[in-house]
Amino acid sequence: MPKLLEVRGLVRRFGGLTAVDGIDLDVAEGEMVSVIGPNGAGKTTLFNLVTGLDHPDDGSVRLAGEDVTGLAPEALARRRVARTFQHGRVFGNLTVMDNVLIGAHTRLKVARPGWPILGAVAELGRALFGVFEPAVEEYALKAEAREILKLFGDRLLPRQDQPAYSLSYANRRRVEIARALALKPRILFLDEPTAGMNPTETNEIMEIVRGLKATGLTIVLIEHKLDMVMRLSDRIVVMDDGARIAEGPPSAVRHDPKVIAAYLGHGSVGGADDRAAGAVAEPRLKAVAGGRA
Amino acid sequence: MTSFLDHTINGLVVGNIYALLAVGLALIFGVSRLINFAHGSVYVVGAYVGLIAVAHLKLPLPLTILAVVVGTGALGILIERVGLRPLAHSVRIAPLLATIGISFVIDQLIQLTFSPDPQALPSLVPDWRFTVGGVTVGALDLVIAGIGVTSAALLYGFLTFTRLGWAVRATAQDRDAARQMGVDVDAVNRAVFAIASALGGLSGLLVGMYYNYISPAMSFQATLKGIVAEVVGGVGNVPGAVVGSLLLGLTESYGIALLGTTYRNLFAFVLLVLILVLKPNGLFASNRQLPPEPMTGTFVAPSRPLKLPASALAGLTVAAFALPLVVTTPYVLQTLSNAWLYAMLGLSLTLVAGTVGQVSLGHAALLAIGGYVSALLAVDLGLPVMLAILAAGLATGAIGTVLVSPAFRLRGHYVSIATLAIGEIVGLVILNWESVTRGPIGVSGIPPIEIAGIPLYSAAATYWFTLAVMVVLALLQAKLLASHLGRTLRAIREDDVAARSHGIALSRYKAIAFGFGGFAAGISGAITAHLYSYINHETFNAQISILALTIVILGGMGNVLGAIVGSVALIGLPELFRITAEYRILIYGIALLLLVRFRPQGLLGTV
């Protein structure tokens, strides 16, 4: 299978702490991979390194065969890499519609990069004096943005002209996903898209992600809700302490004792030995993961 | 060799004085994440308290020092109470803007009380000197060194051995955690402001004695020097501030020896910009820090802007154009012309500081560039005035963008400091580049504006011309904001990390904003130059930058109509009520303070 994303030996140190310690990660075209692991395992740091927000100390990232290690996030966005953020980073004072349109920024013809400096001058000129072309493009993009908003039922569409700061937390997270989709990504990184959502809302997001997957979109997901992870993923990568401790299809990862230990803490918990911890954890993981499978 | 050592001694003495300023700034930043722009004012107050003590009360040196320490310490507590505490839950840059307002108020009060003229502050230290190995050392040098070392020792003891000192350090590390552990953070802030201000006041006293010269105008430069030293050492790093101060003192001293005194400040600001660009966390810190959470650096309060219907706007415009038919008093028309010129500057700043969130504190430099380019093109090259003005606008857009581009990679407070320094550098280059700018003499005989060969001499003609140019610029800016650039620039302001992740190259769009804004400001400066017929390096000073910022906050950040309303309110009204210049500055300071505290979204709302 052709690999869309190839991560090799990625390392990121913060002072004495190695947050990401030699991670390898392959994602094939159309595949959905979930990255799970306890808090502080390095999942978000991994996302930041792959999407250009942070520079790795070592290792490489290749996208469709091209070396993109250390490229700026805007350069990766132009290669149609999209992401959402763990704590939600919508543009509060922009309307829902404008937020989504920002997602389409890399596709704007009026904003095409062009030559250095001259490209920027040309863009300013088109914005100030352009009459027909920018208006037509804007009109088409807005129609497209409304289609994306429709994915979320009547959650966002009626609120498209409201500023994002006036939305509920769950709606802001939805705006973020809509914004990422407006980029027409070839790979989408979702960092805990359902954090802080209730079960109904979580299910809605899960259905949306399932729908996106069905369209053939490549998705990398960080998520703590194992139910969702187990049901949607083609493959799961488990991280702990910056390293990959397990990888495989949901059915295999679910029973991996290392995974169970990582989720319950290292070694013995409260005097109990590893086996006891595993014995407690296994049914719990099964309950969340396998319950409805 | 001897002179080299003399310069070294001089640099260390001056550095010692800067250290007293910078340590205070670092302490304050450490506990409250605030760059205190009122620190120079405290320093001036220290000098003037010293003047009263020495010249009027005839106190001996120890009592003079005590009076300065107590007086400025109390002032520090007052500043904390007015400028910082009420803004604890405001955006990060709000207290910074508040301290700018406070410094305007203090400086102006000093000026009203003691007159703006410089005065002599007699040194209480006997004027004997001795020579060691060819180096001359004066008694005052030793006193300054002694006070510096003693203050450092006392501060070290306080931070290391007292409970309040521990609380200060705990608060500096993690304010919330300290609060949860029962530390009274307000008391810590109070103590830190008192200590920092006492040190700053002491510095003012020593400088006054060292140069035998004090004036209210020292305030702004002192703030800047303290900030330079602090940034060099790493913002909030107390030992770093001492090292940074000594480095700054030495750099200045050697620089003056090589090139002359008018270059003194140029070294300081170039050093600042270099440090900001190359080592933004100071000389002693690592560069690899992750960007902080969003919405920490800008000054934009969420609000719904007041929207006027197009018909009302058209009506207002027609009324503005018709005004000279009704009101023929030249004074009123001149005042409003001036307001239109400030509105152009306001448009420029509201785009940069409001829409893109880059709070520029050096915006008047763009006026200076525009004014000088247009004046020199018209005077030296004989270019027709209208052409010169247009060329000046374009040149200012380009030059301004290039000059400010090192600051594109900075965020929050650092943008403000960097733009302030870049603005100062522009003024100093104009002062020192005599072959082109005529240096301190300025450019005179700048031809008046003429349209089709007819000079605009009448007040009404000037009014119409400035209004027309302003309206065109405002319409262009409205078009820009309605295009995709409007949302792109605002997205950068809201969250530059998320913006980058969606393909927005920050430098390109900041350059577009500064380019367009520079054009508007350059046109304004150019027209001003032709109206005044004379400009020099002080025509467009730092006070105008702060006034412009007050104008755009008053109108509502990012708000085009707000910039116009703000400048009519702040330029037009005081003039019409015939408020004299000194009181006007006082009013601007108070207005800024009140706005930041009570109406951060301005009159018409942020966009």
Image: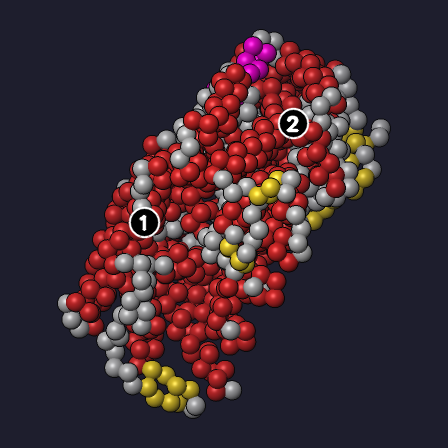
Image mark 1: chain: B
Number of the label disc, if any, that sits on residue B582: 1
Residue B592, by quadrant, is top left
The front one of B74 and B529 is B529
Residue A60 in view of the camera: yes
Could you say where residue A60 lies in the image, as x and y percent from the top left? 74, 44
The magenta stretch spans which residues? Answer: A156-166
Q: Is residue B580 above or below residue B488?
A: below
Which of the two discs, 1 and 2, sits closer to the camera? 1
Number of the label disc, if any, that sits on residue B601: none
Q: Is residue B288 left or right of residue B220?
A: right
Q: Is residue B281 left or right of residue B80?
A: right
Q: Residue at x 38, y 47 (%)?
A: B100
Residue A238 in view of the camera: no
Number of the label disc, if any, that sits on residue B484: 2
Could you say where residue B78 lies in the image, as x and y percent from the top left? 25, 47
Q: Is residue B203 left or right of residue B356?
A: left
Instruction: First in sequence, mark 1 or 2: give its number.
Output: 2
Image mark 2: chain: B
Q: Residues within 10 Å of mark 1 (few under 14, many from 20)?
A: few
Hey, what amino acid is under mark 2?
A: His
Q: Residue at x 25, y 49 (%)?
A: B77
